[in-house]
């Protein structure tokens, strides 16, 4: 049994979740823009290059987490799942839940932190903690990675679940992806700790989702230019490039 990122049985084309996620990770590794952005973001956020690299990998791993909902995968196995409504919101809310469970991220003043990062002018001497770096490198890019298909209404006018049930086959596939990332990709203690937090969150098929203040109109609609915005847009763009490239290559129909 497969876990799907896309399926159109009538046209004989499909893409499994592991093939898609690992393809996005590989795409990142092969893009010269990735290394350029790692160096640039590292300087701007005054943090290690390897931490930025690890967090971008984690964004790649998390970006389609919402597609693993049991209801979506049941539809896939019936023959078609070409769209997964608002899966990006679920993925971002799960990413935030992982942050809350992390031992190293400081997210005590979540709403104020997110609002300040995205709406206030950059302060030249401003310091960034790990929570800031995680929000800018993981949570927001995951939320916005399908930006070409989004409308503001789809983010703001919706009911949000407190939890989802993950498909059992998908969980096993995803645990295999996490194991690969732990062995071959992440090198910082923060990256390793976050992957463990993701793994622990999957001990039960019912997975909790956290509140995401980014869905508040006061945050999204007051999104003004600053250093943080540049970082978010650059990393989101890179994630979108690899997401689209891998999907295009893997979903070419045979008939």
Image: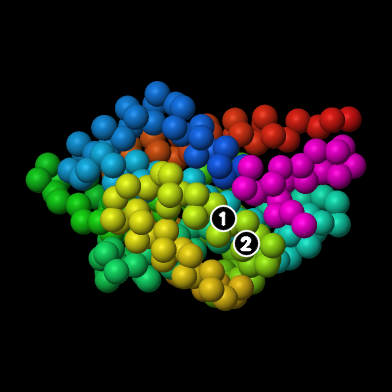
- In x, y percent, where is residue 186? 37, 47
* Residue in front for this viewpoint, 52 or 240: 52
The picture quadrant where one finds residue 130 is: bottom left
Query: Which residue is depicted at the point 44% across and 26% down?
Result: 31
Q: Which residues are magenta?
A: 1-19
Q: Is residue 124 left or right of residue 222?
A: left
Please state if 8 lies on the left or on the right of 214 as rendered. right
Label 1: state its secondary structure. helix
In the rendered image, is residue 40 in sight? Answer: yes
Query: What residue lies at 68% left-to-right and 67% top-to-bottom?
Result: 168
Residue 223 locus on image (x, y percent): 36, 47
Residue labelled with disc 2: 172
On the rendered image, what quadrant is the C terminus found in? top right
Q: Look at the picture and state if 235 lies above or below 64.
A: above
Judging depth in this view, the residue of 28 and 84 nearest the camera is 28
Tag 2 secondary structure? helix
Q: Position of residue 129 (x, y in %)?
A: 21, 56
Which residue in the structure is indicated by mark 1? 176
User: Looking at the image, which residue is at 51% across and 32% down?
Assistant: 27
Q: Residue at x 34, y 53 (%)?
A: 191
Q: Nearer the viewer, residue 149 or 33?
A: 33
Disc 2 residue crowd, few under 14, some 14–19, many 20+, Cα 10 Å? few
- Mark 1–mark 2 CB contact (< 8 Å): yes
For the image, the number of numbered tags is 2
* The magenta stretch spans residue 14: yes
Q: Residue furthest top?
A: 32
- Residue 6 placed where, x, y %? 72, 46
């Amino acid at each position: 049994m497969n876990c799907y990122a896309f399926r159109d049985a009538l046209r004989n084309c499909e893409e499994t979740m592991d093939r898609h996620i690992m393809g996005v990770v590989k795409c990142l590794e092969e893009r010269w823009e990735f290394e350029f952005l790692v160096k640039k973001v590292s300087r701007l956020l005054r943090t290690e290059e390897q931490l930025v690299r690890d967090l971008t990998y984690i964004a790649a791993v998390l970006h389609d987490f919402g597609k693993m909902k049991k209801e979506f995968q049941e539809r896939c196995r019936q023959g078609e799942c070409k769209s997964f409504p608002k899966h990006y919101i679920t993925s971002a809310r799960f990413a935030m839940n992982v942050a809350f469970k992390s031992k190293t991220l400081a997210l005590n003043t979540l709403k104020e932190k997110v609002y300040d990062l995205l709406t206030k002018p950059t302060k030249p001497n401003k310091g960034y903690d790990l929570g800031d770096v995680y929000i800018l490198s993981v949570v927001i890019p995951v939320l916005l990675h399908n930006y070409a298909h989004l409308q503001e209404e789809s983010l703001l006018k919706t009911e949000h679940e407190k939890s989802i049930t993950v498909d059992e086959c998908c969980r096993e596939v995803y645990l295999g992806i996490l194991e690969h990332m732990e062995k071959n990709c992440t090198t910082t203690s923060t990256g390793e700790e976050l992957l463990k937090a993701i793994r622990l969150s999957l001990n039960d098929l019912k997975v909790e989702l956290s509140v995401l203040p980014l869905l508040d109109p006061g945050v999204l609609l007051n999104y003004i230019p600053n250093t943080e915005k540049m970082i978010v847009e650059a990393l989101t763009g890179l994630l979108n490039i690899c997401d689209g490239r891998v999907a295009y290559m893997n979903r070419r129909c045979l008939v």
